[in-house]
């Protein structure tokens, strides 16, 4: 009897166990299903931008732009006179757009934060501008420039845009020469070229080491001519603080003007236009220390973003390999040494750790290390391109050597850029003629003669490939709001090649936007000029005023710069050259803490309604904090390494970037969902139709 | 080797265009000589902000000697005591421990003070708008290599074109003349075949605008070229005079 009960009891226990196991399995299975469903739902919920939405014209690659121009809508001269366009910024993109639009007959209102349109930071570009002229008969073509740009961008740019860029590149050189830009010439009187990173042809046009200056002064001349004619109304020392959207008869919001602050008087003013074009540059100053000018900022981009314009690929930031290393905590910016130096300069660190240690201790100089003990690591790792590998590759290689302890200055964060071999081969005079002004600049800053001892360089934030998403017409996801130059995301993918920023800025401003904006404005000819007394203008102005009042009222203990420097260090450490999931999560937490610190403890002296530099900086920093966070969020989501975005989890055994084309071959667009809300991801798939995606190879 | 130095900075403070200005002296301790001059001003401003005082307003932007924004008279020289550089490229190693450094805004009737060290250089833009361009619209231009230009000519045009429009020339001139600025642009464009067509008209228009805006006359003292951060040559002024006379003869 007892046995029977025991058996029953045992059976019960077994049954219970089985049941529990089954239940557990069921729960697990259900969890998996729910997980999968959630993932699928999330995937399905990620909206997608189709080529039609991006307005990419149909047809073969080389005919897209021609077809577009042949079929786009135009605005006749009488109607052009009735349309006003606001252009923000006077860099290469802004100035060339403002001048070209005015020449065509539109009324242009052009704004810049400097005291003159000639001072935008495009002026500091040194090396040159690319074009597919093939003047050197070295096998260049529009297709090859297109291909190099797509490949250099690690296959993360839009094919149609890049092809158009290569196509109009030749017009830019013609235009600039006609304006009187004094490009370097050969003895026969024809234009000279040099080579730049990421290309095997010489297609870079240059004007000494001041190409950006000369191109910008060309655009500034054209702009000045239109200001003189009264076709452009120029507003210097004005900063845009918001964009005004007004719904049309169908309720669709369109950009119809801006709110701007007169930086001299502190007055907030309203301006109407039928369309708004923003060419405000990049957001590299999020890092505080960068090669950007002190006032370069990302606030215009954030204003667009908050109104619904997507922010695309914010994590794609370019770290330039050849900058003068940091020398102290008081440092305000980093100075770039032109990439053109890599034409003749050779980059190296010592082969032996003990030599590096002695260099770091200041016991020896670079020239004391014999040839056989030097490691020309770029030539060693990338025989085919050598010292002319693209910027992202060269920067990471420098970091790799310094991380291993081979750095050559007192901080261990520098490598040598050596001209001794070039001086032997070409003579000091030739080297001085080619690079003299750069050598002089180096000597003034570092107090060391680069003809006698190799220069020291280190990577620094230089350019942002990410930016506001635009369609093929350079229109953002907000109607009537256009974005050009570095401020948009379009043409460089995940990494920009040297001498291509000038090309893109001028392409957008001279040859693309003046066409495409007409396709929009053709439908706006019936829209009368609107009063800036409309409630939308009043509301926008009030919001700007409230934000300023809030900032002025904090009266805390920290200067704007001290908080900005802190943000910069976090960006460099956690969202810099080598990123990890863990680090990025940590970085986001730290950025959130900075935001809190800023909004509770910043101190701004003086009055808001007067000239107040500290207030200007504070308004910009408020936006840099948001951009920094967005960069980190984007970098965390992009689980691959491509171009300027290097996730340490995704690299080849040799330490090269490892793309995940099956998962991340898209433009990552972020949509603003409200203050302190996580942004929504929107994808524009990059289905390469015309070019085969390869692993970037600069080795052979 | 760069050291740490203690300095006094005597700065021109002026609340607004019509306000009465005055010098104010500030002490700065432990300034690294590797810092740039503007970084020294940043340190001073951080100190002032910490004391809840109004920081010194000054123009600056690129900090690599090319935008032309910075504009300070340092110890009696535009852009300071070093040659062929802008204020932002000046480093503290040019100063000695215990030194008192005097900092003023550009001195020129045509560049009125906005606040402290910041001046209004809009007059230079107006001169450019009067004729500092080649009259071509975007598009419809010949191939860039259609007109060969001898290398020495292109190089000379480039040297003239290296002007950054900072205003040091007019600020250095005892007459407050903008001749070097105007001459640089007139020369650059007159040298090149693309700009030659309008050379005489351009010279006339730009000089007329310069006179109208209250800049003084050129008496060939050469202070402008001596202080020019880009070493723009006085030869450009001779070329401007030739173009200007040619234009007058044509009239």
Image (cartoon, rainbow, N blue to C red):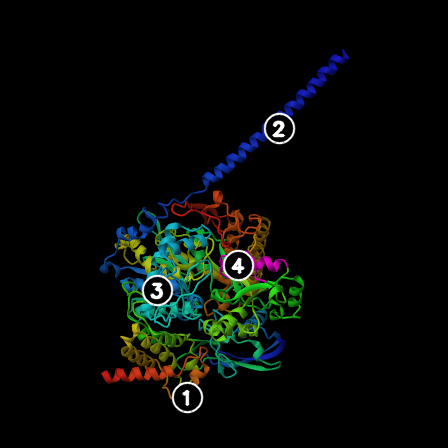
The residue tagged 2 is A24
Same chain shared by disc 1 and disc 2: no
Measured Cα–Cα span from mark 3 to mark 4? 28 Å
Measured Cα–Cα span from mark 1 to mark 2? 96 Å
Question: Tag 1, which chain?
Answer: B
Query: Residue A185: where, in percent of width, then height?
Result: 37, 70
Q: Would you say residue A252 is visible in this rendering?
A: yes
Closer to the chain start, of discs 3 and 4, is: 3
Query: A654 or A181, which is in the foreground?
Result: A654
Residues tagged 1 and 4 counted as in contact (Cβ below 8 A): no
Residues tagged 2 and 3 counted as in contact (Cβ below 8 A): no
Query: B126 or A458, which is in the foreground?
Result: A458
Query: Residue A552: where, in percent of width, then height?
Result: 51, 63
Disc 3 or disc 1, which is closer to the eye? 3
The residue tagged 4 is A394
Question: Tag 3, which chain?
Answer: A
In the rendered structure, which segment of residues is drawn in magenta?
Answer: A375-404
Residues tagged 2 and 4 counted as in contact (Cβ below 8 A): no
């Amino acid at each position: 009897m007892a046995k029977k009960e025991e058996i029953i009891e045992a059976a019960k226990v077994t049954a219970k166990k089985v049941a529990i196991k089954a239940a557990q399995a069921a729960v697990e299975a259900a969890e998996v299903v729910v997980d999968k469903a959630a993932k699928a739902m999330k995937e399905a919920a990620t909206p997608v931008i189709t080529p039609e939405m991006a307005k990419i014209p149909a047809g073969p690659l080389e005919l897209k732009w021609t077809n577009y121009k042949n079929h786009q809508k135009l605005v006749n001269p009488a109607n052009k006179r009735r349309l006003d366009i606001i252009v923000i910024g006077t860099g290469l993109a802004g100035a060339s757009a403002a001048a070209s639009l005015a020449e065509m007959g539109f009324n242009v209102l052009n704004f810049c934060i400097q005291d003159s349109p000639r001072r935008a930071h495009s002026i500091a570009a040194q090396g040159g501008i690319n074009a597919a002229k093939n003047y050197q008969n070295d096998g260049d073509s529009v297709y090859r420039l297109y291909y190099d740009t797509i490949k250099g961008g690690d296959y993360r740019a839009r094919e149609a845009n890049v092809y158009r860029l290569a196509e109009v590149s030749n017009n830019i050189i013609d235009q600039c020469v006609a304006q009187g830009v004094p490009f370097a010439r050969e003895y026969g009187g024809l234009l000279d070229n040099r080579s730049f990173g990421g290309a095997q042809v010489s297609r870079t046009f240059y004007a000494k080491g001041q190409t950006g200056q000369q191109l910008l002064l060309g655009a500034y001349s054209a702009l000045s001519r239109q200001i003189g004619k009264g076709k452009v109304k120029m507003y210097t020392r004005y900063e845009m603080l918001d964009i005004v959207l007004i719904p049309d008869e169908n309720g669709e919001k369109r950009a119809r003007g801006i709110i701007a602050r007169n930086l001299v008087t502190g007055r907030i003013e309203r301006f109407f236009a039928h369309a708004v074009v923003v060419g405000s540059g990049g957001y590299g100053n999020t890092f505080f220390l960068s090669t950007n000018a002190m006032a370069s900022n990302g606030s215009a981009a954030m204003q667009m973003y908050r109104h619904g314009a997507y922010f695309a690929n914010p994590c794609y930031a370019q770290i330039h390999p050849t900058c003068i290393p940091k020398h102290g905590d008081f440092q305000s910016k980093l100075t770039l040494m032109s990439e053109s130096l890599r034409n003749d300069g050779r980059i190296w660190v010592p082969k032996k750790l003990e030599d590096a240690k002695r260099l770091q201790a200041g016991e020896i100089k670079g020239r004391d290390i014999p040839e056989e003990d030097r490691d020309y690591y770029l030539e060693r790792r990338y025989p085919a391109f050598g010292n002319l590998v693209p910027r992202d590759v060269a920067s990471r290689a420098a970091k790799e050597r310094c991380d291993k302890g081979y750095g050559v200055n007192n901080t261990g964060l520098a490598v040598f850029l050596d001209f001794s071999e070039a001086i032997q081969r070409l003579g000091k005079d030739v080297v001085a003629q080619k690079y003299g002004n750069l050598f002089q600049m180096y000597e003034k800053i570092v107090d060391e003669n680069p003809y006698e001892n190799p220069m020291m360089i280190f990577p620094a934030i230089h350019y942002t490939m990410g930016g506001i998403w635009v369609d093929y017409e350079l229109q953002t996801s907000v109607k009537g709001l256009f974005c050009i130059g570095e401020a948009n995301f379009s043409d460089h993918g995940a990494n920009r090649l040297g001498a291509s920023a000038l090309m893109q800025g001028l392409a957008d401003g001279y040859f693309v936007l003046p066409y495409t904006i007409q396709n929009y404005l053709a439908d706006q000819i019936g829209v009368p000029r609107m009063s800036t007394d409309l409630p939308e203008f009043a509301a926008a102005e009030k919001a700007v005023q409230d934000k300023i009042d809030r900032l002025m009222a904090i009266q805390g203990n920290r200067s704007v710069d001290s908080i900005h420097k802190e943000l910069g260090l976090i960006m460099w450490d956690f969202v810099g050259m080598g990123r990890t999931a863990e680090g990025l999560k940590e970085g986001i937490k730290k950025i959130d803490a900075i935001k809190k610190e800023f909004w509770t403890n910043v101190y701004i002296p003086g009055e808001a309604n007067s000239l107040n530099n500290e207030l200007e900086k504070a308004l910009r920093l408020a936006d840099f904090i948001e951009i920094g966070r967005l960069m980190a969020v984007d970098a965390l989501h992009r689980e691959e390494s491509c171009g300027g975005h290097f996730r340490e989890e995704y690299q080849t055994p040799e330490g090269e970037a490892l793309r995940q084309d099956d998962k991340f071959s898209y433009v990552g667009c972020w949509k603003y969902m409200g203050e302190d809300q996580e942004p929504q991801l929107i994808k524009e798939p990059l289905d390469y139709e015309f070019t085969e995606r390869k692993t970037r190879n600069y080795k052979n | 080797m760069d050291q740490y130095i203690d300095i006094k900075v005597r700065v021109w403070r002026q609340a607004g265009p019509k306000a009465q200005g005055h010098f104010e002296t500030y002490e700065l301790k432990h300034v690294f000589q590797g810092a740039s001059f503007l970084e020294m001003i940043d340190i001073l401003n951080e100190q002032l902000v910490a004391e809840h005082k109004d920081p010194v307003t000054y123009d600056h932007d690129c900090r690599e000697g090319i935008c032309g924004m910075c504009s300070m008279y340092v110890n009696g020289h535009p852009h300071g005591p070093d040659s062929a550089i802008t204020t932002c490229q000046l480093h503290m190693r040019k100063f000695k421990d215990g030194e008192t450094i005097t900092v003023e805004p550009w001195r020129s009737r045509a560049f009125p003070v906005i606040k402290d060290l910041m001046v209004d250089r809009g007059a230079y833009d107006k001169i450019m708008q009067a004729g500092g361009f080649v009259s071509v619209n975007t598009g419809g231009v010949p191939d860039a290599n259609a007109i060969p230009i001898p290398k020495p000519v292109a190089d000379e045009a480039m040297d003239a074109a290296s002007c950054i429009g900072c205003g040091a020339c007019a600020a250095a001139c005892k007459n407050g003349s903008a001749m070097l600025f105007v001459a640089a642009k007139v020369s650059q464009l007159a040298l090149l075949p693309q700009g030659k067509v309008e050379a005489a008209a351009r010279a006339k228009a730009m000089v007329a605008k310069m006179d109208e805006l209250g800049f003084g006359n050129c008496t060939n003292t050469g202070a402008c070229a001596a202080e020019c951060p880009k070493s723009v040559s006085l030869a450009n002024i001779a070329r401007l005079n030739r173009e200007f006379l040619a234009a007058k003869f044509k009239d």
